[in-house]
Image: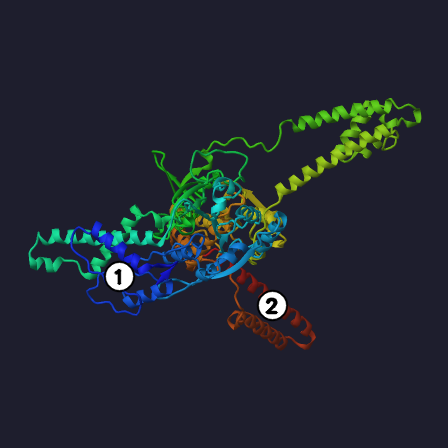
Amino acid sequence: MQQTGENILAHFQKILNDAVHENLKYGGINFKYFTWTGIRLKKDTLAAITIMDCDSTWKFFEDMKTPNVLVIPYVDRGQVFPQMILDAKVQRILNWQTAIVIMDQTLMNEDRHLTEYIMHESIKRNIEPMSIVLYNIDDQLKRQKKRSAIREILQLFDGRSQSKQQFMIFSKFYEDIIEIAENMRMFHVGNQWLFFIFEDTRRDFDVTSVTQNLKEGANIAFALNETRNECQKSLNCTLNELSTALVSAISQMTLEEQSLYGAVSDEEWEYIRYTKQEQQYEILSFMRNYLKDHISCSSCARWRVITALTWGKNQEHQSIVHTTDVSGNHNKNFEFADVGYWSPTSGFVAHELLFPHVVHYFRNITLDIVTIHSALVLHRKNPPWQIIKKDAKGTVEYSGIVMEIVKELSRMLNFTYKLHDANTLEYDRYENGNETTWISLIAVIFVTAPVLYLVNWSAPTSHLKVQGFCSLESCFWYIYGGLLQQGSYYLKTLPAGGMYLPKADSGRLIIGVWWIVVIVLVTTYCGNLVAFLTFPRFQPGFDYLHQLFIHGDFKELGLRNNTFFENYAAISSRLDFQKYLNHAIVYNNSLQENLEAVKIGSRINVDWRINLQLIIQNHFEKEKECTLSMSKESFLDEQIGLIIPINSPYLDLINAQIYRLYQMGFIERWHQTNLPSMDKCNAKGVLRQITNHKVNLDDMQGCFLVLLTGNFYIFLCAATLDNNNKHLGFIVAGIVILGEFWHYQWHLKQITRRKFFSE
């Protein structure tokens, strides 16, 4: 065992003897020294100190078959990355299964074992494998070419907003990588970024300025090199610290055993004394604590890890401030938590997760949630979606499917929330326009018309003067008509008549500028109007509404005001929707529902199913009879959603959690729970059968009966009438057949109507 001409064994013997002489105050220690690894330790051996390479150390540890071990790697300056990554995997600081590794070409040439340790795996040592995709950056490139190379690498992983990707960056160009990745929107809730900041760039590193353009939802951590340059590291120094820790631990444990032995009997001592495994555990625990407090030369290499706390920082509960800027979710309130530090002696000492949001999501922060209830909603309580109950003390209780979803989301994503009723909040007025817009437009009309008149009047020659612009009234109507895109028509209809445009260049310049203004105004107004009046597109409904028009007894068709169906039917291409909307009587309150007409079968009301169920239930509780029924068919689904801020990074995450709730059946369960209680009016047996029904022989037997009856009458008439009146017989038979057909249709109509309004 030779290293740099020194005999390690001789030095180690001297170091260990000095440590025993200075620190062993109680008991005694017998040492044996070996210079080979193929040895078998005796059963009474308490501890072993090895100075070997990594492979020999792990082999010796496996032969020992003991769970208690303290490994102190001896790492040269600049070669810490392999050991750091290995410790992070062993201690489960880094639980990645795949990683995208980007490193400088210089570092790759200097440390060829780095990628090997990133991918290192061992089932016995509880080290899980990690698949990597390796890219290198030529650090000799100029700035623009270097940025192009970085962009080409990141473009391979761009556009995957819902995918989960892990990036490990070993580069001194971290600022360019962060800037380019942010422009490509790669800092979202699914990605994780770990940056290693080298020693030569550590002094210029400012975490606030580096992340100032990041939006919330980013998962980013930094490993900062805090290695001390003045530290003098040597193997002898490390051995001295380790020997002192071992001897002090044995001395302390011996003192504790002696104190305990003197206080109990021999029988009790045999029962409570430390076992060999417990002694080893106590020694290693004391050594770890001792090295943390007294380590000096072994702690030259030191890296500190910080992580950004970004989720929900701009939406976190505070005094609600209403501003017009709702899209500014850049870094304003980011916090940076100290994850811990790493050193070769202690490994990772962590008191925080590397990416806390990946595990704990919103970390129990409080978010503000606004719920909106219109007057109609408050009257109906908007079941089963939102239900508000307020007691005499003013305490508000929220329930319903939407509230259950929000409650479950808060549990799944680890946040608390505070509900606010939109009707009770005081909002700052949103300046959607300027009050002086119309005043300015009118002023421009009254200013432009006199200018046009003066320019036409001051033309140097008479042939340049247009007769139609010779009066102030004509100029005003021309300017006003131009605003309405009818300028030529207004000028032509004036008594003076005339050409449509001035002849002088000055007048034409004024008219040209005015028409440009008109085009801009009209285009902007029409565009905003169309955007405002555009209704959302819904999924098409079912195909059975047309059956309502088959029954001619329905004289009135009712429709509740301001429903989604009213808006949807106005833009739908379905003829039955349009026909219903054209004939519908829109009502606003319960008095206009005209339930008496519904009860007698002359009116049908269309509303959301839950509203109709409540109407039937309330009517049954009042009248104690079932005179109203409801269709089994739902031809249009109600559109319900949660509104979150625009460009929110949590949209895909929230959608995924809601979809999980749907898959597990929670939403359907909450829907059934919040529905009105079942009674004999809304039981399944009394619902109308409007589903598709295949025609069978039982349905056709009435037709065969009518046919046989008609044939019988024909035969009877033919047999009883003489030859001279045979035509009369056929006429009578035809009348009888038609009578039977009409009677059958009337009877079928009555049956259908009774089924339609059955109890």
Q: Quadrant of residue 446?
A: top right
Q: Earlier in the sequence, mark 2 or mark 1?
A: 1
**Left or right: where does residue 186 sit relative to residue 300?**
right
| Three-letter amino acid code at the position of disc 2 | Val
Q: Relative to residue 514, is residue 40 drawn left or right?
A: left
Residue 685, image x, y percentages: 42, 60
Q: CA distance from mark 2 to mark 1?
A: 116 Å
Q: Which residue is mark 1?
A: 48
Residue pointed to by mark 2 = 736
Which of these two is toward me, 691 or 471?
Answer: 471
Question: Where residue 60 appears, x then y in whole percent?
Answer: 31, 66
Residue 533: x and y, percent? 62, 42
Mark 1: secondary structure: loop
Residue 587: x and y, percent? 53, 42
For the residue pair 594 and 429, the one nearer the viewer reads as 429
Residue 682 visible within the image: no
Considering depth in this image, is 404 or 163 the residue closer to the camera?
Answer: 163
* Image quadrant where one finds the N terminus: bottom left
Please state which of the two labelled residues, at mark 2 or mark 1, is closer to the viewer: 1
* Coloring scheme used: rainbow
- The quadrant in which residue 226 appears is top left
Residue under the point 21% across and 67% down:
42
Can residue 685 be seen in this snapshot? yes
Disc 2: CA contacts within 10 A as few (<14), some (14-19) or many (>=20) = some
Examine the rendered structure and indicate whether residue 417 appears above or below residue 393. below
